[in-house]
Image (cartoon, rainbow, N blue to C red):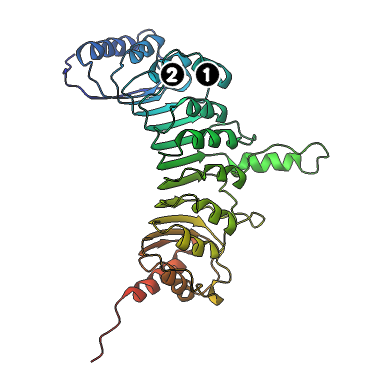
Amino acid sequence: MSLSSKLSNLDLDLGFKSRGPNSSSDYIRQYLQEVVRIAPGLQRLNIRGSVAHTLLGLVSSMRNLQTLSLRLGASMTIDVLLAVSTFQSLSALELHAGHLNADDLSCALHNQDRPVFPSLKTLRIRAHAPVLESIIDSIPPNTLHTLRIEAEDPSGVPVVWSGVFKAISHKAANTLQNLTIEHHIELDDVEQHNADTTGSSQVEAKTDTPIPFDDLQILRPLRHLRQVVLDTTLPPALSDENIITLVTGWPELRHLDLGATLLSPEAASPTFLSLNALAKGAPNLESLVISADLNGIEAAAVPVDVPSHVALTRMTLACTLTSEPVQVATYLHRLFPSLVDVEGHPEREEHWSRIRDAMQRMRLPLPHIE
């Protein structure tokens, strides 16, 4: 075993299969002991897989780490989280903590006698919503720049986002620039659950639902946001007015991804008028992913008070197109003259190809006539 004292990055993929008595656990433990002894300046550690308690103790002693990723499954413990939370130089942390008990974690963080996450700027975490809320609420105010959260709540139960979003707005209103929100479910489970409860006279059954607008608008105080991504199986059901309300709270927004999944006919959905609102309210926007209804765009004209938006260059627009490609291209080019990369639903690729061709012709300079 040969290690350099200059070792700065270490990746360990241990897998999640159980290990027998003659496994490599002893070798891994000895290796990490050598890392702790020889390379105390280790800056980045990435561990994926089940980890024995003795190995977790070694990780807890690596107090000079700046970047740490712990995707440990059920072997992740509150004690380890408490230990790494006090690392003075830790600026980036990734955690998979789906099995931790929220009440136990909240109590442990509250009783911690040392400052937690004093230098944390980037956090990526997957856990139940109450755990997300507890960890975010423990972070010092105005330190987070990048946050990626994934709710891992049980299928069939709606995620209570309001507490999580309040914690984010309270802790990061002056610093957060990049926010990604993830929630993935099996649609078959939702459909089966709805079918099983149809016609029931009892209290309305709880099931997975899109993120409500009332919860999303809790995030409006994050005025320095530059990137917002909603990566959810069920996209948020937003009206044109809802989108206006959100983007006017984020004047520095450059990348907005509201999902490219087609919404059900019953759900509230943006129309092409939301594009006008984005052109006016998000002047720095460079890329956009949105599901919108374009019906009526062929007979519409861009209002004179809506300026041409020159920053936007990329757009993915999920919709069921009925309008002529040239009419759609004309409207989009008037709003976004710099738009060069526009995509739509894969099943209508031929239609979108014609839209792109038309927009390309519109960007060409007019021929010079002597």
Task: Please say if the residues under marks 1 and 2 sit with CB atoms less than 8 Å apart.
Answer: yes
**Splitting the image into 4 quarters, where does residue 28 fall?**
top left
In this rendered view, identify the residue nearer to me: 91 or 329: 91
Identify the residue at the far right of this view: 201
- Left or right: residue 75 versus residue 65 is right
> Residue 242, position in %: x, y?
58, 54
Q: Earlier in the sequence, mark 1 or mark 2?
A: 2
On the image, the x and y values in percent for residue 55 come to 36, 12
Identify the residue shown where x is 50% and y is 65%: 276
According to the picture, the residue beneath numbered tag 1 turns out to be: 105
Q: What amino acid type is highlighted by mark number 2?
A: Leu
Which amino acid lies under the numbered mark 1 shown in the image of this protein?
Leu
Q: Is residue 18 in view from this perspective?
A: no
Location of residue 306 in the rendering, given as x and y in whole percent from the top left corner = 47, 68
Q: Nearer the viewer, residue 187 or 262?
A: 262
The N terminus - image quarter: top left
Residue 349, image x and y in percent? Answer: 45, 64
Residue 283 left/right relative to 194: left
State the SS at label 1.
helix
Q: In this figure, which residue is indicated by the disc labeled 2?
A: 81
Q: Locate the C terminus by quadrant.
A: bottom left
Q: Mark 2: which secondary structure?
A: helix
Which residue is found at the position 26% from the left and 13% from the top?
Answer: 36
Work out whether 353 lies above or below 5.
Answer: below
Classify mark 2: residues with Cα within 10 Å, few (<14), some (14-19) or many (20+).
some
